[in-house]
Image (spheres, helix red, strand yellow):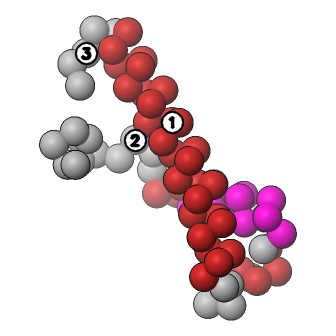
Amino acid sequence: MAQFFPQEKLLPDAVLDRFKYEVATELGLSPAIVSGYWGNVTARDCGRVGGKIGGSMVRVMIRHAEEALLRGQQL
């Protein structure tokens, strides 16, 4: 899969982390992740957060690819 996607990140880690915490808050998991510790969060709840983030990241990647194609860049 690395052959299709550049190694550089589309979004900085800080942006992804902020998004992760926003999703967790949206799902009502804020009390469980006080001070950035996720050890009290169940695997099921982590999967819910990861699933929402993963879906959103795919949409962002598709949008960036479409914009690159419109600019005439080769993917």
Residue picked out by circle 3: 73
Q: Is residue 70 above or below residue 15?
A: above
Tell me the element at label 3.
loop
Which span of residues is magenta-colored? 17-28
The stretch drawn in magenta includes residue 38: no
Q: Residue 49, how many percent across, how many down?
A: 64, 64
Tell me the element at label 2.
loop
Q: Earlier in the sequence, mark 1 or mark 3?
A: 1
**Image quarter hosting the C terminus:** top left
Do the numbered discs 1 and 2 sit on residues whose CB atoms are within 8 Å?
yes
Residue picked out by circle 2: 10
Residue picked out by circle 1: 60
Task: For marks 1 and 3, give the CA distance.
Answer: 17 Å
Do the numbered discs 3 and 2 sit on residues whose CB atoms are within 8 Å?
no
Task: For marks 1 and 2, give the CA distance.
Answer: 9 Å
Residue 64 visible somewhere in the drawing: yes
Q: Residue at x 66, y 85 (%)?
A: 42
